[in-house]
Amino acid sequence: MKEFAYYPGCSLDSSAIEYGMSMERTADILGIKLVELEDWSCCGATSGHNTDHLLSLALPARNLAIAEKMGLNVLAPCAACYSRHRAAEHAIRSSKSMGDKIREVIDMDVQGTVETLSILDVLANDIGPDQISQKVTKPLTGMKAACYYGCLLVRPVEITGFDDPEDPQSMDKIVKATGATPIDWSYKTECCGAALVTSRPDVGNRMLYNVLRNAQESGADCIVTACPLCGLNLDMRQAAVEKEFKTKFNLPVFYVTELIALACGDTPKQAGSDRHFVDTLKYLSQIEVNRVRAASEKAEQKAEATESETEAPDPEATQKKIDAMLKGWQKNPAKMAARLIEDEERAAVLVEVMTGDKKKMTRLAELMVTDADKAVKAAEAFITAELKKKQA
Amino acid sequence: MGNAVTLIPAREQDRQLISKVEKEAGTSINLCYQCGKCTAGCPAAFAMDYPPRQIIRLLQLNLVDQALEAGSIWICASCETCSARCPRGVDIAALMDAMRREALQQGKITDKKVAAFNKAFLNGVKNFGKAYEAGLLMQYNLTTGQLLKDAGLGLPMMKRGKVSMLPHSIKGKDEIKKIFDRAEQLGGE
């Protein structure tokens, strides 16, 4: 199991709360152990390095010192936290005199022995897209996502270095693993305006507009990000930008970890996706419709192919399949029920019926092998009967 | 004559100041051959009085006061695109950063809003050890005289659990105050 010292940073339990929630869900799903840094403090972000160089290195160095005691690499999902911690590591490692100064300021020992990693690096390179797609139960079929990396995950190159600064691919690979389609666009690493959107909206809003417009013109129907400030700006300020530039974008904005949680079966609420400003729920239900449609088309094609291939089914082979199906029901009824019934609650009822009635289980297993359509109908009938029985 | 630069003999103190900024930024302005790639890629250049290339040119001409008083250094969003693309390896973003800090020290702040934002942000960190977003916006609005700026976003943010009115302190907040104090003492060395 992968284990990290977890540095959520200030945003992941406030303005980017859905990033924090979905980060923890992603870790659970993919078997990543997160041990939160004890009493961590703010990295100082951009305001820090705009104001005082030494302070901007000392603030993250305090967290690095705590992580060194834990002996774990740091996972910092926020792009700014990631960048500032990497900058501090870099300064400590490359200059003894700067390292001494930093140690004096924080009054702790820190040697730069641990490394801070971004969630994109961990997901794309440590875990890998294959491992992610293996966990996917509800692929995000038809989602056209503009993967937006922003600045600090890919720049400065000496400090980041896990992906290309002009045309990064790590997020695209992750998004693809969830069943969505990453689109090709030119503003992947263009700046969203960062704090200027708050301090100088006359400048920041235009930067935001440029990013949103390019995503829309390139055919995206949503934006995916791994930076809390990019996420907040694109999402919360989208309405103001639409008003100022007299246009409509209506582009939902997700954190990359939300897509993983959703594709692996989480409800939008569990993934925190109901907390955005631009509505995501209607959009996600459309994606769900796409998925169900695609799955049934695929099943139909498969059925047609097998029908034409085998004129007369071999009874022995059929029996073998039925036995296997039955075994599946005995071992993992929830998974089998999910194959037939979309609705989670109704699927749970089916599990109840099946586990309580061996005969029905055998009948359904037979149908699933011989006639998939009938199997769904039978399952629905079982559930409806059971629900009626409960009501009575 | 319109575009000509008036060359004045460089003062020793200007030269020293430029060296200090270069050292802080860990880069050299003499590497720049004025190709303009930084400005071409700068996403905020449209709002700048002197875009990045011209800031460097001012420094090359020893016109350091003019560079420090440029609005551009406060418009720069630290996106690092210029530094990533510079064919001569000039770290322009670090230079902009060092210029902001120098302007701040000299009290030459041409964009009070950005400086006020940074101050309000760091105040929260100094007092509580973590960013205090509600306090940041209140202080920023008060000091810049825009009392109702973004007021309409408060409630929607609260509804989504994205901002709390009260700050959350870390246990070691006194340590953080000391870090601020010692950084200030040692920073000038």
Image (cartoon, coloured by chain):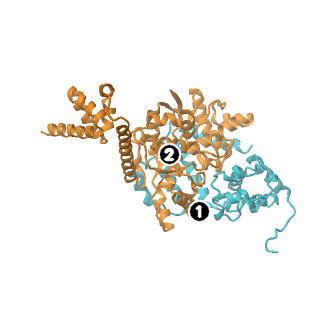
Chain colours: A orange, B cyan
Assign a secondary structure to mark 1. helix
Chain letter behind tag 2 = A
Question: Relative to B8, is A81 above or below?
Answer: above
Which of disc 1 and disc 2 is earlier in sequence? 2
Q: Which residue is drawn at 50% across and 63% down?
A: A241
Furthest toward the front, the residue is A311
- Between the C-alphas of marks 2 and 1, the distance is 23 Å
Q: Is residue A13 visible?
A: no
- Kindly indicate whether the residue at mark 1 contacts the one at mark 2 (C-beta within 8 angstroms): no
Q: Quadrant of the C terminus of chain A?
A: top left
Query: Would residue A116 be found to the left or right of residue A311 on screen?
Result: right
Q: Are marks 2 and 1 on the same chain?
A: yes
Q: In which quarter of the image is residue A194?
A: bottom right
Query: Would residue B168 be found to the left or right of residue A309 on screen?
Result: right
Residue type highlighted by circle 2: Ser
Furthest toward the left, the residue is A392
Q: Which of A236 and A390 is in front in this view?
A: A390
Q: In which quarter of the image is residue B65?
A: bottom right
* Residue of label 1: A203
Question: How many circles with numbers are drawn on the protein?
Answer: 2
Furthest toward the right, the residue is B9
Q: Residue A328's x, y, as percent? A: 33, 27
Q: Residue A313's x, y, as percent? A: 32, 31
Query: Would residue A78 be found to the left or right of residue A267 on screen?
Result: right
Residue type highlighted by circle 1: Val
Q: Quick one: label 1, few (<14), some, or many (20+) residues within 10 Å?
A: many
Q: Quadrant of residue A343?
A: top left
Q: Nearer the viewer, residue B186 or A134?
A: A134
Question: Relative to A214, is A28 above or below?
Answer: above
Question: Relative to A213, is A389 above or below?
Answer: above
Q: Residue B143's x, y, as percent? A: 55, 59
